[in-house]
Image (cartoon, grey):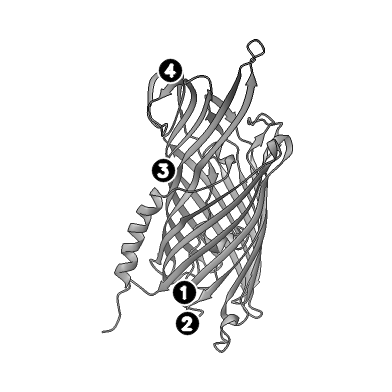
């Protein structure tokens, strides 16, 4: 059984890299629609993680690697996400829907000693998957000939992240952690224009090849009042040290298509071509959280995340993303883990909400503009950990289910409003694997 799980970790990771993720039209800007951190445990609690130390020995926290003082078992997690997006714009009263299902997280974690814990994780970080067509009719005032002008916007590609995290318990109430993050993948955007009375196409194409490496440093303080079992937790993280090889290429050209599927170009003429190397793919990020709870009963936390704005080459022009922040609140509740007569009293119930001031500011022409409309996001979430029959408080394996409902964007200036429902399901298999027995 253990060999099967290890083989699954490797093979599923290969599948995760190849899959195609659906997302919002706002993915056209920058590195796409960010999916990370998309673990069920974190998203079901509104995104709180910085001051969250699991009371159970089977859950490893990658978001803040310092928060793993209680982790004692080997844990394998496999998780999938089903996204359901509903888009609306006042431009021609257009509505559309988009659905996608993908593997969103695979991780393996284990203790190296009573003070040192280690985890390996593989997730999609961001993605582009959109195809938008805008057509309108134009009449020549001299000949009165009518023609249809069409702009087609396409985007594709996925940016993945592989991580290795280490946690070290410095003292009874203080821990630190370090996570190394490697980002890799290819992203492309195409803005294509043509008319019904001509076979020539004009395309503006941006392709980005990403190979990026950075670090996340975490720290945590937790005080437990042993007389009341109440605990106070404070955590902080910072992501820094970009070592990037991000090559962005831009090409403005005209061409013909020689096949019906419109994939093979011919007689391409280059009008303009640029290339840039950037090292600020993922600039400074920081997070601060505080939490309070009762041991093995309940926990509540509040968290603030900050991300510094960055520059990107978008259709041949350098654009600036604004600083963004996110405020999250959430927690969990466990009725009575010792009540084996009532299964639902041993279920962990999670809840949360968040508001995010996004990094995109877009004007009425669809361009990034500091004076445009901020594309913000807010949502609520909930979830449960359904323990397996033989699970206990010291060996909490089970089925994890989560749901997130939210809204992103605006209808102002003919922009797009996005409502979504994300469903998540996964398994956490935890046990004392890969340990040498002390007795025969």
State the image coordinates of residue 23 (x, y, percent, origin top left).
54, 46
What is the secondary structure assignment of the residue under circle 3? Answer: strand
| Quarter assignment of residue 434 | bottom left
- First-in-chain label (2 vs 1): 2
Give the image location of residue 320, x and y in percent.
60, 31
Point out the tag, 3 or 4, that comes first from the N-terminus.
3
Q: Earlier in the sequence, mark 3 or mark 2?
A: 3
Reading the chain from its start, which is encountered first: label 1 or label 4? Answer: 4
Give the residue displayed 66% in from the left and 30% down from the top. 369
Instruction: Out of 355 and 115, give the one closest to the viewer.
Output: 355
Instruction: Say whether disc 1 or disc 3 marks the residue closer to the N-terminus.
Output: 3
Report the residue marked by disc 4. 270
On residue 2, which mark appears? none
Q: Which residue is mark 2?
A: 389
Q: Which residue is mark 1?
A: 397
Q: Is residue 27 above or below residue 5?
A: above
Q: Residue furthest bottom?
A: 341
- Mark 4 secondary-structure assignment: strand
- Regarding residue 356, the answer to whether it shows in the image is no
Residue at mark 3: 184
* Residue situated in front as seen by the camera: 60 or 249: 249
The residue depicted at 63 percent of the width and 11 percent of the height is 143
Alpha carbon distance from label 2 to label 4: 64 Å
- Would residue 330 be found to the left or right of residue 186 on screen? right
């Amino acid at each position: 059984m253990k060999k099967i799980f290890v083989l699954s970790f490797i093979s599923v990771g290969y599948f995760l890299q190849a899959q195609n993720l659906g997302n919002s039209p706002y993915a056209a800007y920058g590195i796409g629609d960010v999916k990370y951190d998309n673990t069920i445990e974190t998203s079901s609690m509104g995104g709180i993680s910085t001051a969250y130390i699991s009371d159970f020995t089977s859950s490893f926290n990658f978001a803040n690697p310092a928060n793993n003082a209680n982790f004692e078992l080997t844990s394998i997690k496999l998780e999938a996400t089903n996204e359901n997006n509903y888009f609306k714009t006042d431009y021609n009263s257009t509505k559309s829907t988009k659905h996608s299902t993908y593997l969103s997280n695979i991780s393996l974690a284990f203790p190296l000693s009573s003070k040192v814990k280690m985890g390996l994780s593989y997730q999609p970080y961001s993605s582009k998957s959109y195809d938008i067509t805008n057509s309108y009719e134009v009449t020549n005032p001299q000949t009165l000939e009518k023609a249809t002008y069409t702009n087609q916007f396409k985007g594709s590609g996925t940016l993945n992240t592989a991580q290795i995290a280490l946690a070290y318990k410095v003292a009874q109430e203080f821990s630190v952690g370090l996570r190394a993050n490697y980002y890799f993948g290819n992203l492309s955007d195409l803005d294509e224009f043509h008319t019904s009375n001509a076979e020539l196409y004009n395309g503006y194409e941006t392709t980005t090849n990403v190979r990026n490496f950075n670090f996340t440093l975490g720290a945590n303080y937790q005080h437990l009042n042993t007389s009341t079992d109440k605990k106070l937790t404070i955590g902080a993280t910072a992501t820094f040290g970009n070592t990037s090889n991000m090559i962005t290429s831009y090409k403005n050209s005209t061409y013909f298509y020689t096949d019906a599927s419109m994939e093979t170009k011919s007689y391409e003429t280059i009008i303009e071509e640029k290339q840039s190397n950037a090292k600020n793919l993922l600039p400074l990020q920081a997070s601060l959280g505080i939490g309070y709870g009762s041991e093995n009963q309940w926990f509540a936390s509040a968290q603030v995340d900050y991300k510094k704005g960055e520059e990107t080459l978008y259709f041949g022009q350098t654009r600036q993303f604004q600083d963004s922040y996110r405020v999250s609140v959430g927690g969990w509740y466990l009725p009575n883990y010792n009540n084996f007569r009532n299964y639902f009293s041993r279920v962990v119930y999670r809840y949360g909400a968040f508001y995010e001031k996004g990094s995109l500011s877009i004007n009425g022409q669809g361009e990034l503009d500091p004076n445009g409309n901020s594309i913000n996001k807010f949502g609520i979430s909930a979830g449960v950990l359904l323990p397996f029959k033989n699970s206990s408080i010291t060996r909490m394996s089970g089925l994890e289910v989560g749901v997130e409902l939210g809204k992103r964007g605006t209808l102002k200036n003919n922009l797009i409003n996005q409502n979504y429902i994300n469903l998540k399901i996964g398994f956490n298999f935890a046990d004392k694997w890969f340990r040498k027995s002390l007795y025969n």
